[in-house]
Image (cartoon, rainbow, N blue to C red):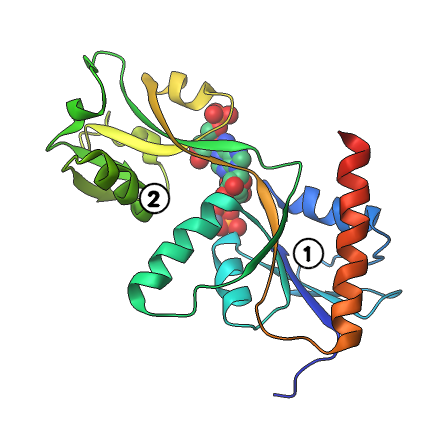
Amino acid sequence: MSESNRLRIAIQKSGRLSKESQKLLKTCGVKFNVNEQRLIAHSDNMPIDLLRVRDDDIPGLVMDGVVDLGIIGENVLEEEQIERQSLGKPAECIKLRELDFGACRLSLAVPNEFDYQGVSSLEGLRIATSYPNLLRRYMEQKGINYRDCMLKGSVEVAPRAGLSDGICDLVSTGATLEANGLYETDVIYRSMACIIQSTQSQPDDKQALINKILSRINGVVRAKE
Ligand code: PRT
Ligand code: ZN
């Protein structure tokens, strides 16, 4: 496969970050039309291709140098980074900047009837999460032994289903926790969307285009502050 001289940017195909990611690039003057059936959207006014993928795939695509830039939640980036470091895979990328959307926190939560006296109350208990690496890092820092319950979805129903004692999941308004009879105890990670770049050296014209996009993003984000 020949290296493309077009700038490749990975964005979430569909989900909480996809509309904002597209809007940001459009506001920066990148013109493109998305065909829902297609993985790639070509810009018609700049040498840019958008790759529309699952958000979980974005950090790896950037770290492996398959794409040049990616827009991703810091939570997913950090989780993937710890995972890759433990597997000895490339785990480096450059965080160009935080963006102004995708705000959430990764928190521990327990059932309303749980008598929570601090994180030591979770000693030896089972915690359901989709973020095993961020959870492990936090619990190691606190010196707490816990048991894993790895779920890619439906984490918030795990305690009621008898699968776990507590959960570690993303929270924004807190409505999901409340609806499931849970309360938030510890915020273990605060996250925003961010834009990342591959560490591979770029030809001058591509790097100049990255700099131009970044400077426009800086302008757009600052204007909203
Ligand atoms: O299909 P794909 O794998 O691409 O998408 P996904 O389902 O893995 O991710 P998606 O679209 O749900 O979220 C993408 C990113 O949005 C996350 O990685 C976060 O960076 C960010 N984000 C911001 C959130 C939330 N807020 C959020 N509230 N991601 C998920 N949630 C979920 C949370 O998991 C829980 O189920 O919303 C629920 C809680 O919301 P509240 O408002 O009830 O607290
Ligand atoms: Zn995902």
The residue closer to the viewer here, 109 or 100, is 100
Numbered circle sitting on residue 36: 1
The residue closer to the viewer here, 140 or 151, is 140
Q: Earlier in the sequence, mark 2 or mark 1?
A: 1
Numbered circle sitting on residue 172: none
Q: Which residue corresponds to mark 2?
A: 134
Q: Quadrant of the rendered structure where residue 212 is?
A: bottom right
Secondary structure under badge 2? helix
User: In screen coordinates, is 173 left or right of 184?
Assistant: right
Q: Pick the quarter of the image with the C terminus.
A: top right
Q: Residues within 10 Å of mark 1 (few under 14, many from 20)?
A: few
**Residue under the image location 79 percent in, 66 percent down:** 209
Amino acid type, label 1: Glu
Q: CA distance from mark 2 to mark 1?
A: 32 Å
**Residue under the image location 81 percent in, 43 percent down:** 219
Q: Can you name the residue that lies furthest to the right here? A: 45
Amino acid type, label 2: Leu
Q: Position of residue 160 (x, y in %)?
A: 24, 25
User: In screen coordinates, is 193 left or right of 27?
Assistant: left
Q: Position of residue 79 (x, y in %)?
A: 40, 50
